[in-house]
Each structure stands twice: as C-alpha cells, then as structure tokens.
Image (cartoon, rainbow, N blue to C red):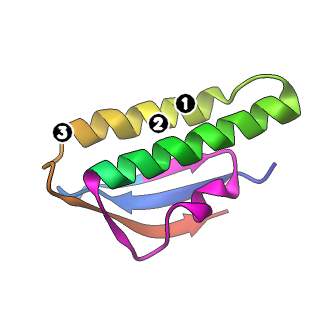
C-alpha cells in the first residue's frame, strides 16, 4: 500500500508534515489550495478514515498511525484562528 506525506501550513504560519498510509488524501486535498480550517479538518478526517479502513481490509487491523495523525490535526486545529486557512504545500510519496 503506497503511503504518503502531505505538507501543510497552518493559519498561524506553522508548517507540518502529515502522514497517510494511502494516497487517498489526493482525492480530498490539492497542492497549492487553501481550505477553511473546519473544511480542512473534515476532509482530512474523511481521507484518513478511508486510508485506515484500507489498511484494515488488507491487513486485518486499522492503521494506528493514520488515527494518530488525525488526532494531531484535530488538536492543532483547536489552537488556530477558526476563520483561518490551511494551505496544502506539497505531497510526498
């Protein structure tokens, strides 16, 4: 299963490399696009849940790394300006 990292910039300017066990993130986010904070969290929640389920289908267990990444995103989002934008800077496979 191809894994990837997607690099983002939070509204406060902080950059973060995020992990996904699947390329499905590319179906929900685009490089160079900026997303409203709530929209970004919802899109990554959907993508990482799908990615984790793909791992479950292949290996018989969910992907703990995907769920940990989602938790980090949700926690970081709570520290941001609710009206801010999250920018997707790059994808790395």
Q: Residue at x 37, y 46 (%)?
A: 41
* Numbered label attached to residue 67: 1
Between discs 1 and 3, the one toward the N terminus: 1
Q: Secondary structure at mark 3?
A: loop
Residue 52 pos. (x, y %) = 67, 35
Residue under label 3, please give it: 79
Q: Residue at x 51, y 29 (%)?
A: 68
Q: Secondary structure at mark 1?
A: helix
Number of marks drawn: 3
Q: Residues within 10 Å of mark 2 (few under 14, many from 20)?
A: many
The stretch in magenta equals 17-37
* Numbered label attached to residue 70: 2
Q: Secondary structure at mark 2?
A: helix
Where on the picture, by quarter, is residue 48?
top right
**In the figure, 60 relative to 45: above or below?**
above
Mark-to-mark CA distance, 1 and 2 = 5 Å
In the picture provided, is 24 more to the left or to the right than 5?
right
In the picture provided, is 22 more to the left or to the right than 81?
right
Q: Residue furthest top?
A: 61
Residue 88 pos. (x, y %) = 41, 66
Q: Residues within 10 Å of mark 1 (few under 14, many from 20)?
A: some
């Amino acid at each position: 299963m191809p894994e990837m990292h997607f690099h983002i910039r939070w509204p406060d300017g902080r950059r973060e490399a995020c992990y996904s066990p699947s390329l499905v993130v590319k179906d929900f986010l685009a490089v160079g696009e900026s997303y409203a904070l709530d929209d970004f969290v919802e899109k990554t929640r959907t993508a990482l849940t799908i990615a984790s389920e793909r791992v479950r289908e292949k290996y018989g267990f969910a992907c703990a790394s995907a769920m940990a990444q989602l938790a980090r995103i949700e926690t970081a989002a709570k520290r941001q300006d609710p009206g801010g934008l999250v920018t997707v800077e790059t994808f790395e496979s």
